[in-house]
Image (cartoon, grey):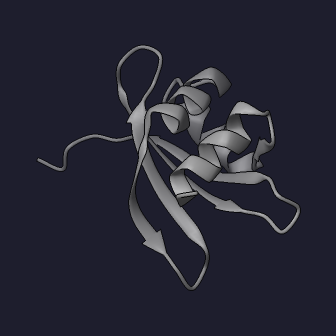
Amino acid sequence: MSTIKQIQTLVSSGLYYLTDHACVEADEDDFDIYDVEQGILTGTIRRRWRREGKYEIVGSAIDGRAIGIVCRLTLSGKVRVITVYEDKPLC
């Protein structure tokens, strides 16, 4: 199973959690837990940090905005969401 499918399956099963930092960052961009779920379930992996075991997923929030999520798979078989942000173009 691909990494994105593994992450999506865990999230679909409710086996994920947000760090305090992720909660604060999501709130600052007016995202909630449902946006994070939707972003992961509709997303693709854009970037990997192999050494740290982290993944950047970009998907769509419920309102259609692009959402970025950085997460990792834990040893206990959950998805740890590290940060959340609105994925805006740089220009």
Q: Is residue 2 above or below residue 20?
A: below
Instruction: Identify the residue shown where x is 61% and y is 79%.
Output: 52
Q: Is residue 10 visible?
A: yes
Q: In terms of depth relative to the viewer, which is nearer, 12 or 24? A: 12
Q: In terms of depth relative to the viewer, which is nearer, 49 or 3? A: 3
Q: In terms of depth relative to the viewer, which is nearer, 87 or 41? A: 41
| Residue 36, quarter of picture | top right
Q: Is residue 67 visible?
A: no
**Residue 3 position within the rendered picture, expressed as x and y whole percent measured from the top left:** 55, 59
Q: Residue furthest left?
A: 91
Instruction: Identify the residue shown where x is 79% and y is 53%.
Output: 78
**Residue 57 position within the rendered picture, expressed as x and y whole percent measured from the top left:** 46, 50
Instruction: Identify the residue shown where x is 54% and y is 26%.
Output: 38
In the drawing, does residue 10 fall left or right of residue 54? right
Q: Is residue 15 above or below residue 50?
A: above
Q: Residue furthest front?
A: 1
**Residue 29 position within the rendered picture, expressed as x and y whole percent measured from the top left:** 48, 31
